[in-house]
Image: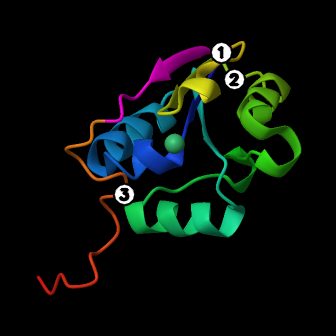
Amino acid sequence: MIRISFDVGGVITKYPSEFVAIIDALQKSKIIEVFILTDMDYQATKKILIKCGLKFKLQNILNADWEKYGERCKKVLIEKHNIHVHFDDLPSYCQSSAISLFVWPNNDIPFNTLEEKPNDKS
Ligand SMILES: [Mg+2]
């Protein structure tokens, strides 16, 4: 079983349609287990996953503890849950035993395309 995790902020929130399609396809695989790995709190994570229409086993949502571990917070969970591949947009979160795939922070695209702008009536 290959265990793959995805960050939320700047990854799923930046490219929701692409990552939702990728994650949905991977979740159908019998040789891949998908995780959400974020430093957001559980309620905020759940809200975003619902907004994206992503369904997840609760035990596969991993919330990293920044207060306790700082920039090592995802490394701790990656090693605890034996994650093999991780997608993230923060270089310090790409330092772990996993194969880290860096999502380049393209400034032409908003960090969170799921958020409605306050004055956007369309
Ligand atoms: Mg991020």
Q: Which residues are magenta?
A: 98-105
Say what secondary structure mark 2 lies in.
loop
Disc tally is: 3
Is residue 11 highlighted in magenta?
no
- Of badges 3 and 2, the one in the foreground is 3
Counting residues from the start of the chain, the first of labels 3 and 1 encountered is 1
Please provide percent x and percent y for residue 53.
Answer: 41, 62
Marks 2 and 1 in Cβ contact (< 8 Å): yes
The span from disc 3 to disc 1 (Cα, nearest Å) is 25 Å
Query: Splitting the image into 4 quarters, where does residue 121 fall?
Result: bottom left
- Of badges 3 and 1, the one in the foreground is 3
Residue 65, visible in the rendered structure: no
Please provide percent x and percent y for residue 97.
Answer: 72, 12
On residue 83, which mark appears?
A: 2
- Of badges 2 and 1, the one in the foreground is 1
The span from disc 3 to disc 2 (Cα, nearest Å) is 25 Å
Marks 3 and 2 in Cβ contact (< 8 Å): no
**Which residue, given by chain and number where applicable, does mark 3 sit on?**
112
Query: Splitting the image into 4 quarters, where does residue 36 fall?
Result: top right
